[in-house]
Amino acid sequence: MKHLLTLKDLSQDEILAIIDLAINLKQDYTPYQDALKGQSVVTLFEKPSLRTRVSFDIGINKLGGHAVYLDQQNGALGQRESVKDFALNLSRWCDAIVARVFDHNTLVELKTHASVPVVNSLCDLYHPCQALADFVTLKEHCGDLSQVTLGYVGDGNNVTHSLMFAAAKLGAKMVVVCPPGHFPDGNMVLEAKQIAAEHGGELVLSSDVAALEGCDALYADTWISMGDDTPLSAIQAKFQAYQINAQLLASSGAKYVLHCQPAHREVEITSEVMDGPGSLILDQAENRMHAQNAVLLKLLA
Ligand code: CP
Ligand code: NVA
């Protein structure tokens, strides 16, 4: 592994090794407290963030490294200077670049011109660090990931894509339930189905929440992602049946609830389930740090 743009590029063994290392880190950072000593990681953001920004910053510190935060002061990358020049300059100072960008192509360009590893911390197509943390969380609570059935409900988006590829590579079953017209990208669905078949997993798509029956966990994300200016009022009625609430949880039989956050309470998920006994949402948030640290160790240590 030289970069992390999408989990599609990683083997099952690489993903499992990251998950295992994340779980080890969570138990004890002592053996790794100087692992990134003398190394610096630039974390740059074209979009807002709470979890990603803080978990990378504090996580890098726990490994003895130094994080340099670049906010949206320059607007979208490539405006003040080209993405190529950005990558060439940063590569002279830092040891890795973590980037949250609007357009996946920006990451591809960074990777092309940087001489240091590039990590995708969310783009329009993927959110691989999120999916890694989510499968760390599922492993902690459900055990063998090849036996897990994860149900994603709502808008087919960047998070869905990364979860689909992680599940497929791990041989897990994933059920994606979206309103008509809001399914994940068709080519990615085909690719993920192919990868799932090769690894003993399965990917099922439906617009009917009844398809969630038998899932171990239900997963929600915002119905409107960053960069999309659709008003909630324009889609809320169409999405209402896809809200994760006590009734949907009971009818699916799922024990656990996940959400990558930021969450919109009483919109895509009710407070009752978000704060309820099956909620793994704060574990996911915590595990972002451990999963990302495992990635950084694989890339840099
Ligand atoms: N889940 C996630 O990436 O959160 P932030 O947007 O706050 O970083
Ligand atoms: N799909 C959401 C995820 C936020 C972490 C977005 O892209 O805004």
Image (cartoon, grey):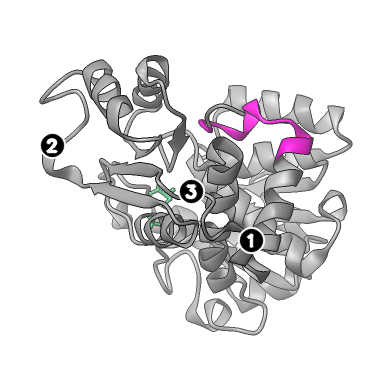
Q: Which mark is residue 122?
A: none
Badge 3 is on which residue?
36
Mark 2 and mark 1: span between their CA atoms? 38 Å
Residue under the image location 81 percent in, 39 percent down: 202
Q: Secondary structure at mark 3?
A: loop
Name the N-terminal-most of marks 2 and 3. Answer: 3
User: In this rendering, does residue 221 appear at all?
Assistant: yes
* Image coordinates for residue 217, horizontal then vertical, percent: 71, 64
**Disc 2 and disc 1 in contact, CB within 8 angstroms:** no
Viewer-side residue, 225 vs 118: 118
Name the N-terminal-most of marks 3 and 1. Answer: 1
Q: Alpha-carbon neighbours of circle 3 within 10 Å: few (<14), some, or many (≥20)?
A: many
Q: Alpha-carbon neighbours of circle 1 within 10 Å: few (<14), some, or many (≥20)?
A: few
Would residue 152 appear left or right of 142 to someone viewing this image?
Answer: left
Badge 2 is on which residue?
74
Please give the range of residues in magenta: 4-14
Mark 2 and mark 3: span between their CA atoms? 28 Å
